[in-house]
């Protein structure tokens, strides 16, 4: 056989690159389907017992495609959802939220080098980097923000984590600026919670929180029951409005949990609503 021509080598490179891209696409689709299957599951025990196998599987997929942004985001979302829904042990929550945050950060660094470089910068410099993002970057930004939020929550007693809140808030605000309806208006809910972290006397902004919660419920057409639960827990309790508190929770309990992509979170919302409603008389 004669020497291989440069054109033949170039063609081979194109073919192998195409095959690699096809495999990356297939693994990303598989990860998306796994995430969707979990989010559509209403039996909490099935998810609790089965999700760890999914987590290990996506770890393996990421090992094979370590710079696949879609795959990294799917892994981050799976770890974040599992941790927030089922992990009560503080040490495990810190460990698993770290994995979620690491995957989200790696996804951002693979696609948004300026944002990646500014992750540890002052809020002003970080804000400038975030401001340079566009609508196509929204999934990366929202994935980073939600993973970062879970990471901070798991370290709520660590001031080194809490000082990240101003930068995290900037990411959610950028998400709203790009498309407030993304993920059913979820960025509004996060910003609503942030506005109630302090009591009004210390700088909390309950009216700002109310506007965010109401807008998120409007955008989602009320389908995401967790939005009402968080409004009751973080707004109604902050302003000591028992009537609104109990009304929101009762609405959650009366509505069906089944909805595309929301069945799991709605089932968890109903569970949380029962707890909060049972505590209502004692709290107020």
Image (cartoon, helix red, strand yellow):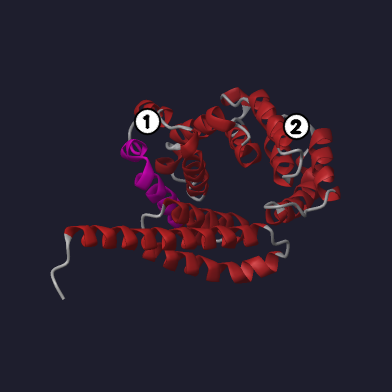
Q: CA distance from mark 1 to mark 2?
A: 39 Å
256 with respect to 145 (left or right): right
Identified at 65% across, 30% down, the residue is 212
Q: Mark 2 falls on what kind of element? A: loop
Identified at 43% across, 41% down, the residue is 159
Q: Which residues are magenta?
A: 97-120
Identified at 61% across, 36% down, the residue is 193
Residue 165: within the magenta? no
Residue underneath mark 2: 240
The prevailing secondary structure element of the residues shown in magenta is helix
Q: Residue furthest bottom?
A: 1
Please tell me whether residue 211 is drawn above or below residue 95 in the rendered image: above
Q: Going from the N terminus, do you reach mark 1 or mark 2 first? A: 1
Residue underneath mark 1: 129
Q: Residue furthest front?
A: 2
Q: Identify the image quadrant of the C terminus.
A: top right
Q: Identify the image quadrant of the N terminus.
A: bottom left
Q: Residues within 10 Å of mark 2 (few under 14, many from 20)?
A: few
């Amino acid at each position: 056989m004669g020497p291989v021509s440069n054109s033949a080598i170039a063609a081979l490179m194109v073919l192998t690159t195409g095959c690699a891209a096809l495999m990356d696409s297939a693994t990303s689709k598989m990860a998306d389907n796994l995430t969707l299957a979990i989010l559509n599951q209403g039996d909490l025990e099935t998810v609790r017992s089965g999700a760890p196998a999914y987590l290990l599987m996506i770890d393996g997929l990421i090992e094979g495609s370590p710079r696949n942004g879609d795959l990294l985001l799917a892994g981050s979302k799976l770890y974040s959802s599992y941790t927030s829904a089922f992990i009560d042990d503080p040490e495990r929550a810190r460990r698993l939220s770290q994995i979620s945050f690491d995957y989200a950060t790696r996804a951002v660094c693979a696609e948004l080098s300026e944002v990646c470089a500014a992750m540890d910068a002052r809020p002003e410099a970080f804000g400038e980097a975030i401001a340079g993002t566009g609508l196509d970057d929204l999934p990366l930004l929202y994935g980073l923000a939600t993973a970062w939020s879970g990471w901070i929550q798991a370290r709520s007693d660590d001031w080194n984590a809490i000082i990240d809140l101003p930068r995290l808030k900037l990411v959610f605000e950028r998400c709203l600026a790009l498309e407030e309806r993304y993920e059913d208006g979820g960025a509004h809910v996060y910003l609503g919670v942030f506005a109630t972290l302090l009591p009004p006397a210390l700088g909390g902004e309950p009216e700002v929180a109310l506007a965010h919660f109401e807008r998120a419920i409007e955008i989602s057409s009320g389908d995401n029951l967790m939005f009402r639960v968080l409004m009751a827990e973080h707004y109604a309790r902050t302003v000591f409005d028992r009537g609104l508190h109990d009304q929101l929770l009762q609405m959650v309990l009366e509505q069906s949990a089944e909805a595309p992509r929301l069945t799991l979170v709605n089932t968890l919302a109903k569970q949380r609503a029962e707890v909060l409603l049972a505590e209502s008389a004692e709290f107020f």
